[in-house]
Image (cartoon, rainbow, N blue to C red):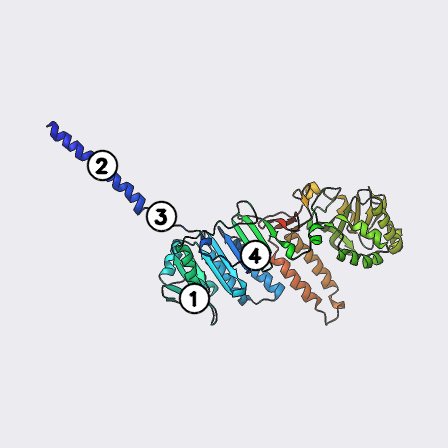
Amino acid sequence: MRNVNSKSSFVFWSSCVVALAILICGLIFLGKPIQEEAAINALPIPEEGKSYVLYVEEGSTLLRIKEAVAVDRLLSLVLSIKEADFKAIDMFLSMIEGSKDTACLVLPSEGKFYLAIKPDSEILHLIASGKLPAKWLEAYPEVTHEVVDGMMRVDISQSNSLWILPYRDLLLVSSSMDDLGLMKSNLDNEGDVSSFQWLVQGEWSGRLRCHVETNIDGELAWICDDEKLSAKWKIQDIEGLLSKEEISLPSPQKWSGNYALPSRRSLTIGLTMIDTPQLTKGVSSLASALGVNPDKLLEFLRGQVIFSLGGEANIFTFHLPGVLFQFPNRGDLGKEIVDDIWENRLQSLLINRGPLEGFESGGVIEIPVSLVLASSEDMTLLGLASTDTLSNGLALEKALPAVAGRDYMFWADVDFGSIAGDMEKLIAVSRTFGSEVPARIDAQGNFDKLYKVVKALKDAGHLFVGLQSITDGELLWEYKSSHTGD
C-alpha cells in the first residue's frame, strides 16, 4: 500500500513539474511580445554634406498645436494659400495621430521622404488587409489605392503617390517602392540610428533637426502636454553663415533694473543694443529727426532696452494701446538726450508738459496725446502712454519673473488674446477715418485681414521666447493658458 501511495505521489508531483515547465515555456515563447522597433531605425542615414530635415517624436505635438491654433486658416490669410493646399498636411497629421513613436526624414535635393510611425494594431491590420483608415480618407476622400507586391500604393494625385507597408509594429511610408524596401532592409539589418548625436542635451519627447549643405546644423527639442509646450534649440557651425565678429558681438546680460511695465501687455521685447553697421547707419537719420547729436544718440542706444505694447494712450479722443521704450542706467546722457528732444522738437508742447514723479528731466503731456519723455539717473522713458499706465506699472520681477535675473541677449513675451483686443481698437479707429481714405487704398480690407489673422490666434494663449546666445534659445508656449498679463 505504501508503494502505491509513493508511486501516486511521484506521479502527482511529476505532473505538477511538467505542467509548470510547460506554463513557463508558454509564457516565454508563446507569450513573447512582437519585436518592438524604434521608428527612427527604419530611416536611412543621410549622406554627409547633403541637406536634410529629421523629425522624431513620441506622441503628436503637431496635432496639439493644430487643435490649439487654426494653422491652416492663419497661413491662408497671411500667405493667401488655398485651403486645398493643406490637404496633404491634413493627411500627414491624420497618419501620425495616435502614433506612439514617429520618425520622418526629408531629403529636399532628392525629393524623397521616409516616414515610420507606430500606430494602433487596428490600423496595422486594416492596412494589411488592403484598406485605408476612415480618418485618412477624411482629408483626402478622392484618393485611390491598391496593393502591389504586398505594399499599398496610395495615389494622392496623378503625379504623387505614397507607398505604405505594415512591418512588425511599424507602418512604413515613402514616396517610392524602392525607398520603402530600403526602410524594411534597415530594420532587417538591425541598424541602430536611435543613438544619433543630438545637439540639445536632455530628455525630450520630440526633436526637429535641420542640416544644410554649408554644414550648418540646427535642432529644436521639445516636450509638451495638453496645456503648454517647452522647447530649446541650438545651432551648430554657424560660422559658415556669419563672420567671427558678428558671432562674438552679442552677449547675454542679466536682466534687472527699475523697469515699470504696463499691467496689461500684449507684447514685450527686451534686447541689448550693440554696435553694428546697421545701427550706426540708421542713427544719423534718427538723430536728425529727434534733433540730437548722432554720436551721443549712438552711445545712448547702447545697452539694454525694453519695448512694450500695452496699457493705454490717449491720442486725441481715442483710447489706444500704449507704446513705451525704457532705457535703464543711461545717467546724465539720458537726461541730456531727453532735454535736447524737448527743446529742439517739442518746444511748442512745453506749455502742456507736467513733471513725472521720480524723474529729474523731461515730463509728460496728456493733451493732445499721452506723451512721455522723461529721464532719471537709472531710467529713461520714451513713448505714448498715459500717466495711469505709468503709475500702475509693475516691476520686472513681478511682471516677468521668467526674465528677471536671467541672462538673455534677446527675449519676447506675447499675449495673443491681448493682441486681438488691441486690434479691435485699431479697427474701430480705422472705420472712423474710412471715408477720408482714397478709394484706391483698401485700408478697411487690410485692417480686417490683419484682424482675422490675430483673431485666429486669439485663443492661442501666451508665448515666451528667450535667446541666451546667437546659437541657443528657449521657448515656452502656454497655448491653453488664460494668462492675460495682469
- Residue 248 coordinates in the image, percent (x, y): 70, 50
| Residue position for label 1 | 154
Q: Which residue is mark 3?
A: 33
Q: Quadrant of residue 427?
A: bottom right
What's the amino acid at mark 1?
A: Val
SS at badge 3: loop
Marks 3 and 4 close (CB-CB < 8 Å): no
Q: Amino acid at mark 4?
A: Cys
Front of the two marks 4 and 2: 4
Mark toward the start of the polypeptide (2 vs 3): 2
Farthest-out residue, left: 1
Q: Earlier in the sequence, mark 4 or mark 1?
A: 1
Q: Residues within 10 Å of mark 4 (few under 14, many from 20)?
A: some
Residue 316 seen anywhere in this rendered image of the structure: no
Of badges 1 and 3, nearer the viewer stands 3
> Which mark is first along the chain, 1 or 2?
2
Report x, y in % for residue 466.
Answer: 65, 48
Image quarter (top left, top right, bottom left or bottom right) of the N terminus: top left
CA gap, disc 4 and disc 1 = 28 Å
Name the residue beneath numbered marker 4. 210
Lower sequence index among marks 1 and 3: 3
Figure label count: 4
Measured in 3D between alpha carbons, the distance from the residue under mark 4 to the one under mark 2, in whole angstroms, is 60 Å
Rounded to the nearest whole Å, what is the CA distance between mark 3 and mark 4? Answer: 35 Å
How many neighbours does mark 3 have within 10 angstroms: few (below 14), some (14-19), or many (20 or more)? few
